[in-house]
Amino acid sequence: MKPAPLVGRNSSKIQDASPTTVQVGNATIGGTNIFIAGGPCAVESAAQLEAIANHLGPNRGNGHIQALRGGIYKPRTSPYDYQGMGQDGLSLILNVSQRHHLPFVTEVMAIDQIESLSAHADMLQVGSRNMQNFDLLKALGKVNKPVLLKRGLAATIEEFVMAAEYIASHGNSNIVLCERGIRSFDSYTRNVLDIGAVVALKQLTHLPVIVDPSHAAGRRELVASLSRAAIAAGADGLIIECHPNPDQAISDAQQTLSLEAMAELVESLKPIATAVGRRVAEPQRQLVAA
Amino acid sequence: MKPAPLVGRNSSKIQDASPTTVQVGNATIGGTNIFIAGGPCAVESAAQLEAIANHLGPNRGNGHIQALRGGIYKPRTSPYDYQGMGQDGLSLILNVSQRHHLPFVTEVMAIDQIESLSAHADMLQVGSRNMQNFDLLKALGKVNKPVLLKRGLAATIEEFVMAAEYIASHGNSNIVLCERGIRSFDSYTRNVLDIGAVVALKQLTHLPVIVDPSHAAGRRELVASLSRAAIAAGADGLIIECHPNPDQAISDAQQTLSLEAMAELVESLKPIATAVGRRVAEPQRQLVAA
Amino acid sequence: MKPAPLVGRNSSKIQDASPTTVQVGNATIGGTNIFIAGGPCAVESAAQLEAIANHLGPNRGNGHIQALRGGIYKPRTSPYDYQGMGQDGLSLILNVSQRHHLPFVTEVMAIDQIESLSAHADMLQVGSRNMQNFDLLKALGKVNKPVLLKRGLAATIEEFVMAAEYIASHGNSNIVLCERGIRSFDSYTRNVLDIGAVVALKQLTHLPVIVDPSHAAGRRELVASLSRAAIAAGADGLIIECHPNPDQAISDAQQTLSLEAMAELVESLKPIATAVGRRVAEPQRQLVAA
Amino acid sequence: MKPAPLVGRNSSKIQDASPTTVQVGNATIGGTNIFIAGGPCAVESAAQLEAIANHLGPNRGNGHIQALRGGIYKPRTSPYDYQGMGQDGLSLILNVSQRHHLPFVTEVMAIDQIESLSAHADMLQVGSRNMQNFDLLKALGKVNKPVLLKRGLAATIEEFVMAAEYIASHGNSNIVLCERGIRSFDSYTRNVLDIGAVVALKQLTHLPVIVDPSHAAGRRELVASLSRAAIAAGADGLIIECHPNPDQAISDAQQTLSLEAMAELVESLKPIATAVGRRVAEPQRQLVAA
């Protein structure tokens, strides 16, 4: 492994050996908390996001998600595939986020999107295809927002750690790593969740590590079990695709959970979290603005 | 997926929809039990096995393993690598197994080994390199012993299921599947534990599925976390390499746990098992024969 | 790389540094000759083989193949897939082989098939799934027949070389290596022809190396170009699936060439062979027995 | 495969079925010409480039390269690895390029580099890590310069074609595809040259396809054979790393050829090119400016 003086576990640059926690709005990633983000692959409408926040957010008895996820810029294989709502989507997710006191994370695909996204989003996601878009990483190093860095489609653990080091070495150490499955020879699952990488990354770095079981599995019937495995392995959280009407989702329908399944999944994580000395925080109930 | 009428989950050949349990000596794989097998990569000496059985077997307070593992025929990359003790090793492991009331599993590499091994071993393992050695599978279909079928180095889930179907279609339905990591582009871990395959195999078949975290990881510091992930994901058990003096192990030293680490690992699984409605059975204490 | 004292290029056991040639009936693999074997995936009927030998064998003007290939024992993913004609097929291919003076190669899947196959076949093929069936390799080490060793589905170059060393170290050094594509993440082609491995194997060992472009590609429209690439890269020959009526082939239809396409392909190799100092031998015309 | 109306072979948008040729300075990629670009991984000094141009350029008897390659912005795994000379390197390569009448290609890593690079370079390279940096692709779609698009580290053939479609759909159809090896489980070679992809890309698109054997192999002793294989398979050219003193190269030393080896390699391609109806063009001799 190449040396990673800033994000490496034995960094001399951090004051003590304790793992980093990253604050995302009112939620914490790292420490004892198990962080859960949920939401659609793509932001589609106000009604879609409102349904999610209503069903899973802090005002629904015990809130099941601590943050919203939703893409407004979508990296798609074909230029003719749906590319996301863009700035219109930003207004929608910002509005729901604020009224429900749910921080949100969304993907940034280009340097010129950083300014508007960082003004409003609580965490900026770097997608798998951009994990080694070094100029984007450098630019995010200069931003005062947490970065959710997803592992590349076939990035080695070393390359993943060093991509984080690019961000850190340009000034931003609020980095969360996300294992989302790697490519393999088997097409039964969309990708292979590299659970060993989650363990290795926790050992090699002091950064929080979360798991995206939706992209790893590509099949919704696998998502809950993979989520439980991730928490048992020591992951600091999950980012999961869910939708009020999963079969109608514009993208990733096959891997998207219903809101009921999402709530059930989160409930099932609680005893696992306890078993490994963690807990799934419930976001604090607050008045939803009109 | 090709149809698997015998091992498939919706098999019309099994009387009900309930998953299969497989009896290995006095231990059960499947059902609520979490099965734990432990032992060396290669049988080396009576003292080695005795130390393991003493430390982890049923007579050490709460027994941590329900079966011994140990290779006497070793499939090795080079013909000049250590090939195992052969029949001499069989006597050693049989003796320890009997005195400690610990069933044992060992690898069968060739049809002409089946007779002697099946006379004594409690379960016969088919190694990854032989997962599609179809003549061996057919021969094991005619044996009245449970078979532990390890996934091939780069076998698809479909190929793995169909390899089990080869055994079943020749008459033996006492089959346990074992996920042990698949090949990937990353050399940080020896293989990539395909935790999604564990989940998929439980959904696609009615067979018990266990996990070998040792070969998946290739690094001992990852084994405990991968074991916890496996149980959380729904695996029916684990087969783990351990040794009284791991650094001196003839093979697989880097991935082999000490006996203390093994016991600690098994303890850590108990709350995870409880969280998913299972329990880690403790083998019943019995008098050790002289 | 582990040392391969017998098959390694710098073997002290071979008398000089010159590469090995392997004699298969009246054909030579290695040296200046480019060896071409052709035939069906599975032996289906006398008429099928007769058509191939008539069209491509030594008595059709310039013979395009120097050996027949054809499986009578077929390693298939499912036990319910067609498993080959067995001994009945052996008689068929032997008859055509003898009358047309075309040596033949066929796959041996199990030790108990060695005796009858080695009595009649000119070369015994070890399939990809058995590349590390070490007991089969050892048994073939004791046979006085050339062995065509196909690379495992995801075998490393080192493992492939060491599998050959298993055969050689048990007494048989008439070994031909066959690169047939490895598994990758892309499903457009069935496998990925690892042309770099062909080059590496020629550098690392003194054994002849041939290429199976049919299994590598999985699509017939790629086979000719891959064949030309193989020869340009230094391969000693090719083994190609062809059939008088490819779309009716029992197995591998999609990757099987027509006899016309096969002849055309071989013609196209000739200038490539010349460009790299080799030549595509034409089998000598002989009277076809009734 | 997703439809690729602009770069697809059966595009209705191109006037006829003939493949595209791309003009890079005074060199042509596509058609009967085999295009050869050579040069260092990283631009290091005027002397380095001058030596290459002198030895391999049009004024050295029969010129062996038709274009220079050389990185001034380097995508490196670690932020602490050498990142390239930047704009200073641009002046150096431009000067040598102009005096020797050798067009040059260099990598563009970010949108803000496009303006200065496209003002001077003859072709802009998109590196593997940026193959799905869609904003960069879109920006290059608006530039009036040829784009050399390298395949991603583990990009499928479909994803590669669609990345080209991104550029084309934004207005620039001067695109050359470059296969440079994909990731596999074997570490003997740096990557696996996917020669089947070269064939497939020629069938699926009307774009020129060249091969980078240096990054595919990662070992200089494999480069010449892979180059010959590429031309035999139908590639339209090669881009090869060479250096006056390869062992002293700042990066990629192991895979870099000496200038003598490079010249010898190109000579060896000529009969292969002839065998497939192509020819390796010799750049026209011209006065080298002082």
Image (tube, coloured by chain):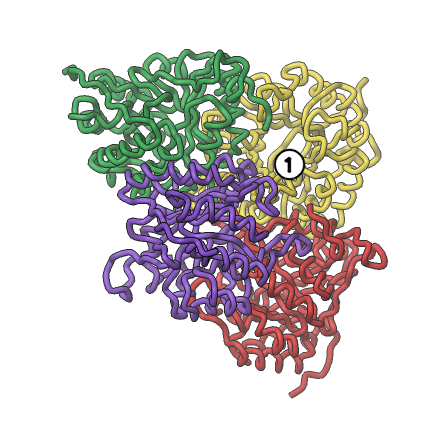
Chain colours: A red, B yellow, C green, D purple
Give me the residue at 25% from left, 21% from top.
C92
- Against C25, is D93 above or below? below
Give the x, y percent position of residue D151. Answer: 46, 53
Residue A268 appears in the picture as rendered: no
Q: Nearer the viewer, residue A21 or A216?
A: A21
Label 1 Cα neighbours within 10 Å, binned few <14 / some 14-19 / many ≥20: many
Give the x, y percent position of residue A163. Answer: 65, 57
Mark 1 residue element = helix
Query: Label 1: which residue?
Result: B215
Give me the residue at 60% from left, 38% from top.
B180
Residue C289 appears in the picture as rendered: yes
Give the x, y percent position of residue B120. Answer: 63, 20
Left or right: A121, with B280 as reference point: left
Figure quadrant of residue C79 = top left
Give the x, y percent position of residue B48. Answer: 77, 23
- Against C90, is A253 above or below? below
Tell me the quadrant of the picture where the N terminus of chain C can be found: top right
